[in-house]
């Protein structure tokens, strides 16, 4: 029995890294997958084909969730195409790192808009259909940085901490409608983004983690499957750290 059979998931920022890992794992578990991407049309087409090979419906949408109207249009298009939205995964995010003394107002606003405002936009866009269905699972991607802060990432940390407060509030508002809202806080996950780091830096990271390794997109995707499935039907308002014990 596949854990996400007959469910439709909308995943933002899914053409690489953690988002791609989640999309593939969800298709393997029987979910129909709608996903967004910002510019990589080629990668989106490839992912669409890969997901369909698991016998599910899949479609990529070029959409900027940081824009309120675009999020509304996206949700309407997905509903029309797939018939329902059972799972929302707000995964899209960016970094523009700098020390507070040097960070520009534009870089602060940009990160808050893409990482935090997009979560508001899309959650608002899907809650009506979820309320009608009287079911839904919203999973928002935060970070260990949102829990402990990080020098040089005031904008990113603020956006990721904001996601946690937002998600807990949504859990309180929508619990009576059987809509769950949870957060995943990944630690050091090895993706294309971390591949550009010096090997020495990566080694240091791995050594500082109790499990002595970086995480994989699949590690995060497995946690998402749990929170999206009926296995976690009594879990809401929680933050699950997928960090190899980094914050222990």
Image (cartoon, rainbow, N blue to C red):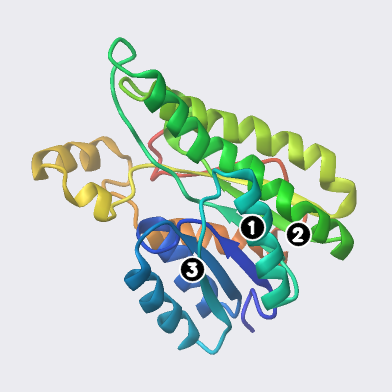
Q: Distance between the Cα atoms at labels 2 and 3?
A: 17 Å
Q: Quadrant of residue 199?
A: top left
Disc 3 crowd rating (10 Å Cα; few below 14, some 14-19, many 20+) is many
Disc 2 crowd rating (10 Å Cα; few below 14, some 14-19, many 20+) is many
Circle number at residue 42:
none
Residue 168 image point, x, y percent: 70, 36
In the picture of the structure, the residue carrying the numbered disc 3 is 23
Give the residue at x 81% y 37%.
172
Residue 240 image point, x, y percent: 56, 44
Label 2 close to label 1 by CB (< 8 Å): yes
Q: Nearer the viewer, residue 96 or 195?
A: 96
Q: Distance between the Cα atoms at labels 2 and 1?
A: 8 Å
Q: Residue furthest top?
A: 101
Q: Distance between the Cα atoms at labels 3 and 1?
A: 12 Å
Label 3 close to label 1 by CB (< 8 Å): no
Closer to the chain start, of discs 2 and 1, is 1
Q: Nearer the viewer, residue 199 or 130?
A: 130
Q: Quadrant of residue 144?
A: top left
Q: Is residue 102 above or below residue 150?
A: above
In the picture of the structure, the residue carrying the numbered disc 1 is 88
Helix or strand or loop: what does disc 2 sit on? Answer: strand
In the picture of the structure, the residue carrying the numbered disc 2 is 136
Helix or strand or loop: what does disc 3 sit on? Answer: helix
Closer to the chain start, of discs 2 and 3, is 3
Helix or strand or loop: what does disc 1 sit on? Answer: strand
Q: Nearer the viewer, residue 157 or 67?
A: 67
Q: Is residue 129 left or right of residue 4?
A: right
């Amino acid at each position: 029995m596949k854990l996400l059979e007959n469910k439709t998931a909308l995943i933002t920022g899914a053409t690489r890294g953690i988002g791609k890992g989640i999309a593939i794992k969800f298709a393997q578990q029987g979910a129909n997958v709608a996903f967004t991407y910002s510019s990589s049309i080629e990668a989106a087409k490839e992912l669409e084909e890969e997901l369909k090979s698991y016998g599910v419906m899949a479609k990529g949408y070029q959409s900027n969730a940081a824009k309120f109207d675009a999020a509304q249009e996206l949700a309407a298009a997905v509903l029309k195409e797939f018939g329902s939205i059972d799972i929302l995964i707000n995964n899209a995010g960016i970094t523009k790192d700098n020390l507070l003394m040097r960070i520009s107002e534009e870089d602060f606003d940009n990160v808050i808009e893409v990482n935090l405002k997009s979560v508001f936009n899309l959650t608002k866009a899907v809650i009506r259909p979820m309320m009608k269905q009287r079911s839904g699972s919203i999973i928002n991607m935060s970070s260990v940085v949102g829990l402990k802060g990080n020098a040089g990432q005031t904008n990113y940390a603020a956006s990721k901490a904001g996601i946690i407060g937002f998600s807990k509030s949504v859990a309180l508002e929508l619990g009576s409608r059987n809509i769950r809202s949870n957060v995943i806080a990944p630690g050091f996950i090895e993706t294309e983004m971390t591949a550009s780091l010096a090997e020495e830096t990566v080694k240091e990271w791995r050594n500082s983690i109790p499990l002595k390794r970086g995480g994989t997109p699949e590690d995060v995707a497995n946690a998402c499957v749990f929170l999206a499935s009926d296995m976690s039907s009594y879990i809401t308002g929680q933050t699950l750290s997928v960090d190899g014990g980094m914050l222990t």
